[in-house]
Amino acid sequence: MTKKDVLFAMVDQECQRQKKGITLIASENYASSNILHMLGSCLMNKYVEGAVGARYYSGCEFVDKIEQETINRFKTLFQAEHVNVQPHAGTQANIAVYLSCLQPGDTILSMSLSHGGHLSHGHPVTLVGSVYKVISYGVSKKDELLDYDEIETLAIQHKPKLIVAGASAYTREIDFKRFAQIAHKVGALLLADIAHTAGLIAAKLHQSPVPYADFVTMTTHKTLRGPRGAIILCKQKWATKIDKAVMPGSQGGTFMHVVAAKGIAAAEAMDSNFAAYQKQVIINAQAMAKELQSLGYRIISGGTDNHMFMCDITHLGINGKQAEHALESIGIFVNRNTIPFDRKSPMLGSGIRIGTAAITTRGATVQDVIKIAHLIHYVLQAYTSGQKYADFSLQVSEISAKLS
Ligand SMILES: Cc1ncc(COP(=O)(O)O)c(C=O)c1O
């Protein structure tokens, strides 16, 4: 195969899309060149199964050191008792936790997908949903916030063995201490899934669940700005069960190139610049949400405490899918989302989810995000009233050209 392979040209096209467009997808980010370097390194060639020092293959002298170093970095970063850096993705990390502490048929209490939860928390279309009994909590109709008293009532009523705290589309800081009180009251274990907010927590801008939860899972590629993958933190008493639930329980060979890249991400998160970046991510999300609010959009729960916000577009008379497509056509990338108590299906949704982690990595300031908010508004207005809006792509290029 030569560099003439059409796939290389396709990758170049994707690079250009990422560079020239404006990425507002809350789960995406731009990893550093050191992380990309690790992902393309010779580590990819090595087969590694089992824990450090107890592998099922020979030739693990150096990969053992690499995995141990990565584990140590995450222990320091999150002050965790035990760390497993092998999960291939957030979904696998959650499955490993379920496997470590639940029996088929046990009850999980988790946030419903339609209110901001994640499929891997037990949606009926997943394996998790078919193996365990899943009870859902949502946000309150009154203010679209988690109602901890109501979650407590559900926990008392259903006596779950595991409570999952964490979400994909909830924009307020989560009170893990309160979740732990509920779990203790009903004798449940607590899993905190911080896939989205790991970077904010690493930067100490949001409460860490580590002192309160039995297990913490996170993806490493969202606000944490590392490679695609996940890690699990747990109390020491769960260490052996978690390691076994990851391998052989739910995975085979470890992706050592990804493990090393996770190690780089942990080091980057300990750098002094990281907290400043995370602060700017929140400032940008809040400024953009406020601007859209002033342009007539309803922001779910009235605002945001984190890197994303949810924008209700019902008043425009279009659905989230239409908005997503209109914006995509001029180079602004968001994703459609259901909003709490939505009557539309997840395929359409009444809202769009907007995140600022990726553009802030490119150096976007409050001034930039305000311009982007106006652009979004012009495009959606033009789309709704049947006017042309393709020319707005020039303004997208101008804003993007200013970013790194
Ligand atoms: C809260 C939460 N948990 C788990 C996941 C799953 O991550 P992955 O896509 O890596 O399986 C996501 C992904 O968006 C998420 O938002």
Image: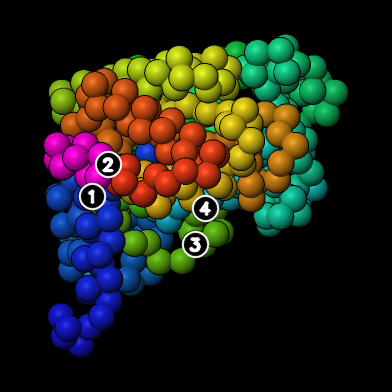
The kind of secondary structure element at disc 1 is helix
Q: Which residue is mark 3?
A: 251
Lateral position of residue 367 relative to residue 205, left or right: left
Q: What residue do we see at 61% from left, 40% from top?
A: 318
Residue type beneath disc 4: Gln
Looking at the image, tell me whether mark 1 or mark 4 is earlier in sequence order: 1
Residue 91 placement (x, y as % from top left): 53, 50
Looking at the image, tell me whether mark 2 or mark 4 is earlier in sequence order: 4
Q: Residue 30 or 262: which is nearer the viewer? A: 30
Residue 97 placement (x, y as % from top left): 57, 44
Question: Neighbour class for label 4 at 10 Å: few (<14), some, many (≥20)?
Answer: many
Rendered image quadrant of residue 115: top right
In this view, which residue lies farthest toward the right? 157
Q: Please name the predominant secondary structure of the magenta segment in the image.
A: helix
Looking at the image, tell me whether mark 3 or mark 4 is earlier in sequence order: 4
Q: Residue 239 or 184: which is nearer the viewer? A: 184
Question: Neighbour class for label 1 at 10 Å: few (<14), some, many (≥20)?
Answer: some
Q: CA distance from mark 1 to mark 4?
A: 33 Å
Looking at the image, tell me whether mark 2 or mark 1 is earlier in sequence order: 1
Q: Are marks 2 and 1 in contact (CB under 8 Å)?
A: yes
Which callout, 2 or 1, points to the residue nearer the camera? 2
Q: Which residue is mark 1?
A: 20
Q: CA distance from mark 2 to mark 1?
A: 8 Å
Q: Which residue is mark 2?
A: 396
Answer above or below: position of 300 versus 50: above
In the rendered image, is residue 4 in sight? yes
